[in-house]
Amino acid sequence: MKKKLLLLEELQVIDCAIDNKQAEQAVHQADIADLEQRLTVARSALAGEQASLAEIQRAKEELEAALQAEQDNIKRSETNMKEIRTNKEFQAVGREIAAARKQVAELEEQILQKTGQQEELQAAIDAHSAELASLEETAASDCQERMAAIADLQAVIDAAVANREQIVKELSSSVVRRYTQLRSQRRGQALAEAREGSCLGCNMQLPPQLYNTLFKCDELYFCPHCQRILILKQEQG
């Protein structure tokens, strides 16, 4: 039975080590996911700005086309004025030209605004493109390092699992099942040291008779409070 307790204690050490390595892997994986999320957000933002720039360009081209049409109308009207014979027609064409020139001025102002928006947005796109390129480079390097770390941790885990399997073979299935249940219920700690009449797993006082019985090492004993398997590690040492 003493050997069984030692095997269970070794099994718990291995399982805790595996848990720790898997937790380290989870941290690396979370960091990789965070980097990928940041890249996704940055790329989406840049794509949005590029789409906005394309929309501004489209609107500007429409304004320029409208401006050209108004300027052409003015030229035609000015040409037609040379053939006008009545004052009434002359005044009507003059009003059309004046309205067209006002429209031209408004279109030119709108085109200037679009040009300013283009320049401002293009500057932002250039800056964000540079930031994205830098982030992609950093993320690629960082992710590569983290993936290597995950692989190294996995190698350690695999070796520990192989060692664990050897220990499990020396224990009965009922003991392993009970140990596994306790680990699940007690945050990975199926065993607890008993010292000076107390269970160090839950810091509760053990019944004196139970504590004294532990010295026999004739079977597995459990804490009546936290249900962990009790071991007398220091006394046995």
Image (tube, grey):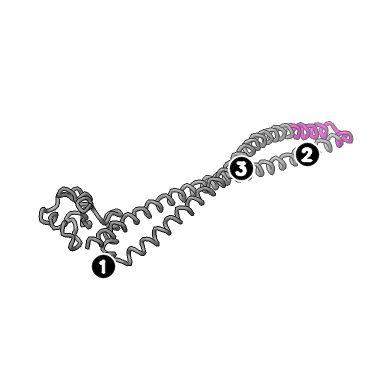
Cα gap from disc 1 to disc 3, whole angstroms = 57 Å
Residue 109 is situated, as x and y percent measured from the top left of the image, at 69, 32
Cα gap from disc 3 to disc 2, whole angstroms = 40 Å
Given contact means CB atoms under 8 Å apart, are the residues at marks 1 and 3 in contact?
A: no
Residue 100 is situated, as x and y percent measured from the top left of the image, at 75, 35
Residue at image position (81%, 33%) is: 88
Query: Is label 1 in a helix, a strand or a loop?
Result: helix
Is 83 one of the magenta-colored residues? yes
Q: Residues within 10 Å of mark 2 (few under 14, many from 20)?
A: some
Q: In the visual, does 152 lie left or right of 100?
A: left
212 versus 168 height, above or below: above
Tag 1: amino acid: Ser
225 versus 122 height, above or below: below
Tag 3: amino acid: Ala
Q: In the visual, does 54 lie left or right of 215?
A: right
Query: Is label 2 in a helix, a strand or a loop?
Result: helix
Tag 2: amino acid: Gln
114 versus 236 height, above or below: above
Give the residues in magenta. 79-101
Query: Is label 3 in a helix, a strand or a loop?
Result: helix
Q: Residues within 10 Å of mark 3 (few under 14, many from 20)?
A: few
Residue 229 is situated, as x and y percent measured from the top left of the image, at 22, 58
Q: Label 1 belongs to which residue? A: 174
